Image: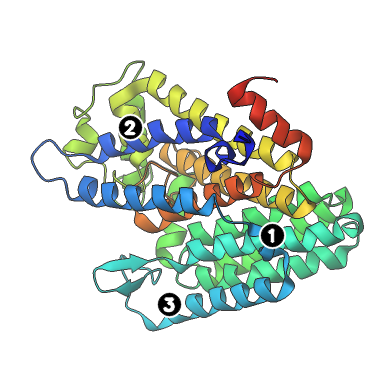
Amino acid sequence: MNFKKLPIFNIDWVIFLSVIPLLLIGLMTMSSFNGQNYFLERQTIWLAIGLIVFFVFSLVDWRFLRRSEIIISLYGFGLFLLSLLFFVAQIKGSKSWLSFGSIGFEPSSLMEIILIILLAKYFSRRHIEIANIKHIILTGLYAFVPFVLVLLQPNFGSALIFFLIWLGMIIVSGVSRKHLIILGAILIAAFSVFWLFIAAPYQKDRIVSFIHPLADIRGAGYNAFQSQIAVGSGQLIGKGVGYGTQSRLSFLPEYQTDFIFAAFAEEWGFFGVLLVFILFGIIIWRILHISKFGNTNFETLFGVGVAILLGGYFIIHVGMNIGLLPVTGLPLPFMSYGGTHLLTEFALLGMVMGMRRYSLAYHRGDIHNEFLGPQ
């Protein structure tokens, strides 16, 4: 019997076993000890669905995504969904959700997957010519359209993720230093336009409160200030699960989503935070390791894009929770409450596992040896 062809051996169990503790930590942090476990119950359902998505996607042969007509269709569909958001009602000051009954869907999460696929396809065929600035401009336009649509919702955090995906993938593809300098100048000009003509008042308040966090503690700087208190009060070993005063006594808002890292750090302390950093580091390292052995440049670049996405979410979420970055409302992968982003994360990991099935031949031998030992 050829064990290498069994679906179970296509799964990178190091990644899977690193994700499970993060999921459990998230559930424990958002759980309530007063009998009201709305977030916990719904997140458990999304977790079960996400695991199904992960294993199903790991069985799919994703080579059909290399076809240009498929990518163009997906990109157009993603833009169509983002355009529909202009006709929906605002939720918490943003038009980020399409509602289907009691279920909400965030199209920007789907568009993140599509953008990674599109850029992986583009750079896989033109990576040798990446020094030509026209490829930077063209791919920039592909990312710019969803960036603007999301920014106008307004949803600055998700728009920033589109930018990071594009920037990270062009850097990996070999953009020249001269073009990076030009790009930096363009970004400064773009930020000036954003600040003067596009940014909503609350977004300006968040940036100002980030620069001067103590200027308006009871207003725009309240969330960031309470988050830093929560993180600092955890000290080395934390206050214990369920004993985080900032979150459990409602001083820290949105602790199940935007500030789950701060709530976790308060209850688990430095050693718990260190564990989370290690687990995320392992996940990103293994994704990059798998992508290194991709069957073509498309699979390699797709894996890099997934690593950039997860790493971007992690860095921004942690940064805004400890006061190093402005509050943007981005979730922490696998830990924050929310079905759309959780399904997106499992879908991406499942796609990476599916691409692992047809990785380079010598890597398939490594997979066999990893679990069964050398023959």
Check disc 2: other Cα within 10 Å, few if <14, some if 14-19, many if 20+: many
What percent of the width, then of the height, locates residue 209?
A: 43, 49
Describe the element under mark 3 as helix, strand or loop: helix
The amino acid pointed to by label 2 is: Phe
Q: Which residue is mark 2?
A: 264
Instruction: Return the mark for residue 63.
Output: 1
Describe the element under mark 2 as helix, strand or loop: helix
Nearest the viewer among 105 and 45 is: 45
In 3D space, how far apart are the residues under numbered discs 2 and 1 (Cα atoms)?
39 Å
In 3D space, how far apart are the residues under numbered discs 3 and 1 (Cα atoms)?
31 Å
Q: Which residue is mark 3?
A: 85
Nearest the viewer among 169 and 67 is: 67
The amino acid pointed to by label 3 is: Leu
What percent of the width, then of the height, locates residue 63?
A: 69, 59
Quadrant in which the C terminus is drawn: top right
322 to 351, vertically: above or below: above
